[in-house]
Image: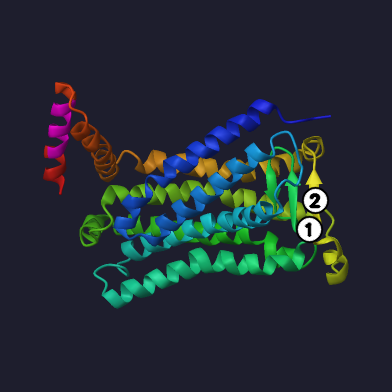
């Protein structure tokens, strides 16, 4: 009987909360850049990191239905945020392609607003639309996996393929095509790509390459898994006959799966673990790409000043070193603004 180690679940809980914090602190910088794709990527990734980390704490070494309300919300948040993360990558690379091909340079206010609406429809509208169709193929309200927590309970039926199973592969494939076109256009326009970047003040040259690399890594990680998951559900697992009444006869119930059961099957264990660890990896990867840029360091300095200045004013015994540090930070801060 195989049971995942307790240490691995503790490790996930710790890294999940850290990933949530690390990627969340970068949101203000990208809000100022007005890049809807990266903002949605941060929001979706941080939400799923927090939700799965909380799940791993609540259901550590148990699979009891402690909170049906939480599970109803968490199971749908996790799957929606997973799709949202993938389509956010599509929004990012789509914007890069439009910039490098001069389709998103020197835009009017109306064009900027139109692009924002399109990004929001892709990054939020598509995941919410798929979620609204998920009920058609659900046989339980949710499924509780020991150590993992609440997840959607979808049965592999014929309608589940176009409604639920196919989308990770589709999103990954479309993003890969856009990424390939963007790389091709970047190489083709090498002679004047710096001029293109200079005409788009919100996106610096280094920032462009970081976003393109992030998208490339995301495609490499998500596309093969999406294809394998689709093939595994269609070929390896027999597709069940679909009946609305039969499928939803147990919908009000909650499935409860012990760890020894889901871990006894290598495919199930791999699928669950990679599903919950992928957002954590994405959070750390995003932080590694953008946490040490000039804009991020300026944000850290502002936060530090916000914290330390009231303390230095309230304490009459502030030492000379702290006073000098605050003064120096004030000078740097005034120079930057």
- The residue drawn where x is 79% and y is 66% is 158
Q: Which residue is disc 2 drawn over?
A: 255
Which element carries disc 2, helix, strand or loop? Answer: strand
Q: In this view, does 144 lie to the left or right of 129?
A: right
Can you give x and y, in whole percent of width and height, for residue 226 in the image?
A: 63, 53
Question: Is any part of residue 181 visible from this angle?
Answer: no
Mark 2 / mark 1, whichever is N-terminal = 1
| Region in magenta | 322-330
Residue 336, image quadrant: top left
Can you give x and y, in whole percent of width and height, for residue 326 in the image?
A: 17, 32
Residue 141, image quadrant: bottom right
Can you give x and y, in whole percent of width and height, for residue 73 in the image?
A: 63, 56
In the rendered image, the vertical position of residue 52 relative to residue 171, given as above or below: above
Q: Which residue is disc 1 drawn over?
A: 140
Scheme of colours in the image: rainbow
Instruction: Please check the rendered image and state whether residue 41 is part of the magenta-colored stretch, yes or no.
Output: no
Q: Which of 34 and 220 is in front in this view?
A: 34
Q: In this view, does 154 lie to the left or right of 220?
A: right
Q: How far apart are marks 2 and 1 (CA)?
A: 6 Å
Residue 22, image quadrant: top left
Can you give x and y, in whole percent of width and height, for residue 321 in the image?
A: 16, 22
User: Any mark on residue 123, and which?
Assistant: none
- The residue drawn where x is 67% and y is 55% is 69
Q: Characterize the magenta stretch by its predominant secondary structure.
A: helix
Pointers 2 and 1 in contact (C-beta within 8 Å): yes
- The residue drawn where x is 20% and y is 32% is 312
Q: Is residue 104 left or right of residue 36?
A: left
The quadrant of the image that shows the N terminus is: top right
């Amino acid at each position: 009987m195989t049971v995942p180690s307790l240490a691995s679940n503790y490790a996930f809980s710790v890294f999940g909360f850290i990933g949530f914090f690390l990627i969340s602190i970068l949101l203000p910088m990208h809000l100022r850049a007005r890049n809807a794709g990266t903002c949605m990527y941060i929001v979706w990734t941080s939400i799923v990191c927090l939700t799965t980390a909380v799940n791993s704490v609540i259901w550590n070494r148990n699979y009891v239905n402690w909170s049906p309300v939480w599970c109803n919300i968490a199971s749908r948040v996790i799957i929606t945020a997973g799709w949202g993360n993938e389509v956010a990558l599509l929004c990012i690379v789509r914007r890069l392609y439009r910039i490098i091909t001069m389709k998103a340079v020197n835009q009017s206010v109306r064009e900027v607003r139109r692009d924002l609406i399109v990004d929001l429809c892709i990054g939020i509208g598509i995941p919410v639309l798929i979620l609204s169709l998920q009920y058609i193929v659900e046989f339980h309200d949710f499924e509780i996996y020991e150590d993992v927590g609440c997840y959607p309970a979808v049965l592999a039926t014929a309608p589940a393929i176009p409604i639920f199973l196919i989308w990770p592969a589709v999103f990954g494939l479309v993003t890969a095509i856009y990424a390939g076109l963007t790389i091709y256009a970047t190489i083709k326009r090498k002679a004047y790509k710096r001029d293109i970047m200079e005409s788009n003040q919100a996106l610096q040259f280094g920032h462009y390459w970081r976003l393109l690399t992030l998208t490339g890594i995301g495609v490499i990680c998500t596309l093969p898994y999406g294809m394998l998951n689709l093939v595994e559900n269609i070929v390896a697992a027999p597709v069940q006959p679909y009946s609305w009444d039969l499928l939803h006869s147990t919908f009000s119930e909650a499935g409860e799966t012990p760890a020894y059961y889901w871990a006894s099957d290598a495919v199930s264990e791999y699928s669950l673990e990679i599903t919950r660890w992928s957002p954590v990896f994405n959070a750390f990867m995003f932080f590694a790409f953008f946490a040490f840029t000039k804009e991020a360091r300026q944000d850290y300095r502002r936060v530090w000043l916000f914290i330390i200045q009231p303390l230095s004013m309230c304490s009459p015994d502030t030492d000379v070193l702290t006073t000098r540090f605050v003064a120096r930070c004030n000078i740097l801060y005034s120079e930057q603004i």
